[in-house]
Structure formats: C-alpha cells, structure tokens
Image: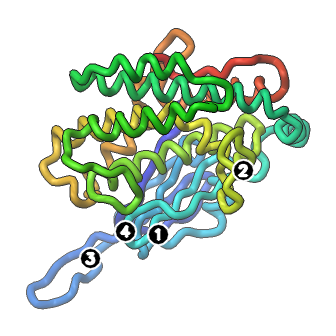
C-alpha cells in the first residue's frame, strides 16, 4: 500500500480522534490596516494508517502527544523543519519488526567484506543512475557508464567522487555550479528532495527490522541515520530528475514555495523500475530495504536497487 506524504506549511492544530489525524486549519481574514484575524477553522481528517511521512514546516503548528504516538506506532516518519524550511529533525519508531533484536545482531555482526560488497553495488547503481539522468538531458557520458562498471569492492578507487565531479559540472548548465547544503539554487530543491527520500528510506529500513544508525559505509559518530544515507544513494538521481522538471516548469526557484514543495512531495509516488517492474518509489524502497535485510542475514548477496 502506498502511504501518503503530507507537508504542513501553514499554521495548524493536529490532534487525534478515533485513529484519525484531525487537522484544524485556521482561515485568516485580512482587514485594511489591521493584522490578520482568524475568521473560522476548517477541519479535515486523515486515517493514521494511510500516512507514511509527515513534514512539519511551520513554527505555528501544534501537535499532540497522542498524534505523535499514533504516527510512530504506524511506522510513520515525522520530519521537522527550521526557519529556512530545511528539514532538521527526523523521528522514527523504535519497534518496527517482530524479529528486530535478531536482525540487529545480524547487522552488527556483518563482516567488512560483506559491507564493502554492498557498498560496491550501491555506488555502481548510483553512478548508472547519474549517467541515465545526463543522457535524458542529451549529455553524452560514456565515461560515467564505464565508471559504473569499474567500481570495486568498497569503491576503493573513489569512483563515486570522480563521477560526482563530472555529474554536477554538466547537469544544470549553470556556470560554476557547486553542490552543497548552503549553496545557491537549485540546491534548496535538491536538499528538500533528498531529505524526503532519506525519511522514506529510514522508514523502510526500520520496517525491515534494521537499525538505520549502523551504516555499511557512512559512519559519522553524530549521524543517527548512516544506513539510510548509504542505501538512499541510488535514489538520489530520481530526485535530480524531478528537480530538472521543476526548473523547466517554474520560473522562480529561489525559495521553496508551497507549489514546489508539493511537486517534491510527489516523489513517494514517482515510478521506479525495480525488480523487472514499475513501482511507486515508496514501494520500491520497501523492496530495497528487504533485500538489504536479506544480505545481512545471508539469504541474499545482492541489493535490489532501481534499474536504469
């Protein structure tokens, strides 16, 4: 089942009634030379079981403990944003699988050769995805396709870095474009899209009984979602493709407007070729997370990633 990704960008009161998320949105009336005043409230309800990700992107949102409990109990990822509308927090359930303790131990005991092989597959798929995006923009890149085939165990030759340098230099046709959290647009769109994908991947890993903190490559001591950051890598090119489409349709991308956020939240239903068929991204991520779990338990040796 495809879960909904919901973003609250306006003031709202979020409460729980009969396992339904109750959303009260104040309607504002503007009077000349007077501050805005609340005219009335519109009320909407959404079944908790239909929600996969909630983004809280306004300082005037009030959410009850009952809502947070219900969302997390139903394996929903809860994202909070800062004043710049950048996601800064992510909450996930602590108990996401019946065999969680056993799976945690398998993950912790995973050998270095296994983790390096998993990282090799991850980077090869990511570079193949980047090459696909470049070709979709009529940019020839035989070097990228060659690098995807040359990734060795653990990416010992840093093919990821080599491919990234070429990719970002050619993707947007923006002189001196630099990819970074605080750099110029369209970095704001990329950051927001990646944050949504990260939350969906972390949610899928927890549902598969894995600990998103223990990565196969990333190991920053301050990062609670290293595994999510690892396994989401091949999904990043899909965000890049969507950002390219948004740039063609929207004249102003200097700020994250409600319309742009709505476009980016559509990532959850974006078609992904995986396992020989098309699936919405949220379902594809569940397939990927399950295959990662099977790699840790020894049932499989290959992660199922998007196909390019």
Identify the residue position indicated by label 1 in the image: 13
Which tag, 2 or 1, sits closer to the chain's start? 1
Residue in the foreground of this view, choosing between 297 and 176: 176
Q: Which residue is found at the position 48% from the left and 33% from the top? A: 235
**Can see residue 306?**
yes
Identify the residue position indicated by label 4 in the image: 84
Dot 1 crowding, Cα within 10 Å, few <14, some 14–19, many 20+: some
Which tag, 1 or 4, sits closer to the chain's start? 1
- For the N terminus, the image quarter is top right
Q: Label for residue 39?
A: 3
Q: Label for residue 213?
A: 2
Give how far across and how far down residue 205 sits, in percent. 68, 39
SS for callout 3: strand
Which tag, 4 or 2, sits closer to the chain's start? 4
SS for callout 2: loop
Give how far across and how far down residue 217 sits, in percent. 67, 41
- CA gap between label 2 and label 1 equals 32 Å
SS for callout 1: strand
Give how far across and how far down residue 298 sits, in percent. 84, 21
Residue in the foreground of this view, choosing between 54 and 65: 54
């Amino acid at each position: 089942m495809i879960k909904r990704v919901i973003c609250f960008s306006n003031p709202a009161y979020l409460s729980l009634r009969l396992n339904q998320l109750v959303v009260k949105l104040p309607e504002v009336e503007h009077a000349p030379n007077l501050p805005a005043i609340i005219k009335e409230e519109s009320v909407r309800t959404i079944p908790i079981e239909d929600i996969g990700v909630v983004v809280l992107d306004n300082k005037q949102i009030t959410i009850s403990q009952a809502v947070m409990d219900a969302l997390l109990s139903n394996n929903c990822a809860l994202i909070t944003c800062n004043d710049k509308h950048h996601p800064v927090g992510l909450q996930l359930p602590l108990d996401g699988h019946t065999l969680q303790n056993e799976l945690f131990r398998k993950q912790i005991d995973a050998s270095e050769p296994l983790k390096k092989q998993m990282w090799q597959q991850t980077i090869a798929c990511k570079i193949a995805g980047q090459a696909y995006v470049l070709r979709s923009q009529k940019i020839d890149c035989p070097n990228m396709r060659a690098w995807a085939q040359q990734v060795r165990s653990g990416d010992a030759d840093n093919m990821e870095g080599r491919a990234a340098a070429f990719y970002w230099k050619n993707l947007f046709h923006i002189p001196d474009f630099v990819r970074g959290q605080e750099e110029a647009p369209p970095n704001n769109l990329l950051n927001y899209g990646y944050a949504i994908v990260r939350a969906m991947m972390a949610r899928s890993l927890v549902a598969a009984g894995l600990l998103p903190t223990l990565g196969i490559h990333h190991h920053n001591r301050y990062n609670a979602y290293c595994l999510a950051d690892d396994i989401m890598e091949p999904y990043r090119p899909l965000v890049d493709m969507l950002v390219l489409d948004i740039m063609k349709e929207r004249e102003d991308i200097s700020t994250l407007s409600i319309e742009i956020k709505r476009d980016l939240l559509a990532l959850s239903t974006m078609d992904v070729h995986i396992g020989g068929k098309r699936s919405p991204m949220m379902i594809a991520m569940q397939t990927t997370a399950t295959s990662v779990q099977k790699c840790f338990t020894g049932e499989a040796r290959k992660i199922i990633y998007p196909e390019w």
